[in-house]
Image (cartoon, rainbow, N blue to C red):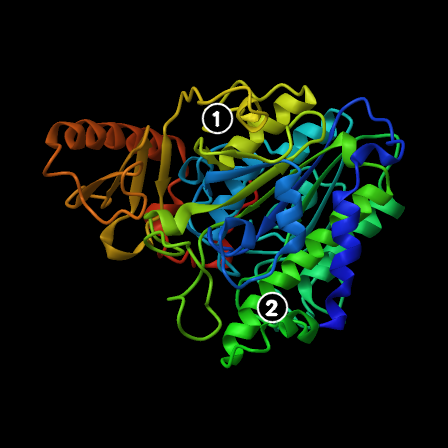
Amino acid sequence: MARLLHYGFVLAALAAPSGARAQEPAAKPNVVIFLADDLGWGDLACYGHPTIRTPNLDAFAKEGVRLTQCYSASAVCSPSRSAILTGRTPHRNGVFTWIQAGSEVHLRTSEVTLPRLLRAAGYATAHVGKWHLNGLFNNPVQPQPNDHGYDYWLGTQNNAAPSHKNPTNFVRNGKAVGPLEGFSAPLVVNEAVTWLRQHRDRSKPFFLTVWTHEPHVPIESDPRFQEPYAGIAEADVRQHHGNVTQLDHAFGQLMTALREERLVDTTFVYFTSDNGPEGDGVTARNRGSTGGLRGRKRSMYEGGIRVPGIARFPGRIPVGRTSDVPVVGSDLFPTVLGLTGVRPPGDRVIDGVDVFAVLAGRAESVNRTQPLYWRLDMAPNNLHMALRQGNWKIVAARDFTKVELYDLAADPRETTDRGAADPARLAAMTAALREHNLAVEKEGPDWWRRLSPNGGTDPAKAKKK
């Protein structure tokens, strides 16, 4: 247990008043989006996990707002990431599924991204960690992070390989890094901290995305983060829980660096996950928790798309808040643009909305012009789409041969299909989903029609635009 004393330093730093030191001046706010991989809605202590220790994220939640109905834009990774950067639902922006190495699917340069807009507005921009927005990674045939507005980047196409331990597949600014010693999340955060301290243009505000691989498989956790779970007999459980604690430790390192650089009061930080937990939850190292919600990664049920969401901005977001207003990953695009005073593109549909008033406690609802909508053609149980209106949600097959209706206020675990009991609501929401789905299909590229559910194709067909 002695090895875990580093938490005391991190927690003390996070708990100290943010105004204890003079902050670095900035005309516009800095922005950090920290994205975990396959972290379930119930995987953090502050979301009710009875065993996993996440002291840094718990402390962070007390300094801002914890969202109880935060959603990823998809039930798998690549689409969720594309929505964060574009504000557009994945089938509209083209990244409709997880992207295999070699796939022609990629985030096209015709999409307008947050880093591109912010860099044009005078921001320094950096990305560290998992990328997973192209099939031809570090290949000029398809756009790379720098083509989407990042000045500086370190990343991988998909997973850290061969695992989180001593990864060998990172690329920095177009050049392979080679073998690294250590574990993925701390390595990724160390790169972010190095950029903050040594490489960024300090005359500019900054936009930083930190996308860790933890707790996505193949999981490997530093033994010191497995020590709190020494009493658990099953090694795979110790590995998984330690992996979440490893992620939490890395997050704490980044928050400490922001404080030491006197950036806390000028920086909006948002933490979330790309989708629900992998696997069945009871075998191998796939032990992520949905907090009792139905379904897991790839599912249109809540356990596949409802994820942790925590935001902090001292002086702008009151401390210790909890909000149950539904917020989705695509909302980050207009929210960040609103905070930074950058105008969104007016030539396309933006599915997300600015939710900062909700985060700050000034609003108890969101006025959406586009509905909360999810689609994943590889989803299980022949249920590929979902749409939410108020507290009601339907899940449906792509051909609508199967449709289910749930009242999330009374039944958040989606145990009882209310379709037979409320046929009028079911018919109205089914019609709304049909109409919206057709509009999204009409705008997006037709990759989803031609490719396998896993997104594989001939790399020779890949195009950059």
Amino acid, disc 1: Ile
- With respect to residue 430, does 9 lie above or below? below
Location of residue 445 (image quadrant): top left
Residue 293 location (% of width, % of height): 35, 51
Q: Nearer the viewer, mark 2 or mark 1?
A: 2
Residue 101 location (% of width, % of height): 53, 61
Q: Which mark is residue 350?
A: 1
- Which one is nearer the viewer's eye here, 50 or 125? 50
Q: Residues within 10 Å of mark 1 (few under 14, many from 20)?
A: many
The quadrant in which the N terminus is found is bottom right
Please, what secondary structure does the residue beneath circle 2 have?
A: helix
For the point 17% across and 28% down, which residue is it?
425
Task: Report whether 74 appears left or right of 226.
Answer: left
- With respect to residue 428, does 160 lie above or below? below
Total numbered labels: 2
Of callouts 2 and 1, the N-terminal one: 2
Q: Are marks 2 and 1 in contact (CB under 8 Å)?
A: no
> Marks 2 and 1, how far apart in space?
38 Å
Residue 96 location (% of width, % of height): 42, 46
- With respect to residue 239, does 55 lie above or below? above
Residue 139 seen by the camera? no
Residue 380 seen by the camera? yes
Q: Which mark is residue 242?
A: 2
Amino acid, disc 2: Gly
- With respect to residue 201, does 140 lie above or below? below
Task: Report whether 60 appears left or right of 464.
Answer: right
The quadrant in which the C terminus is found is top right
- Which one is nearer the viewer's eye here, 457 or 320? 320
- Which one is nearer the viewer's eye here, 376 or 71? 71
Q: Residues within 10 Å of mark 2 (few under 14, many from 20)?
A: many
- Which one is nearer the viewer's eye here, 60 or 335? 60
Please, what secondary structure does the residue beneath circle 1 have?
A: loop
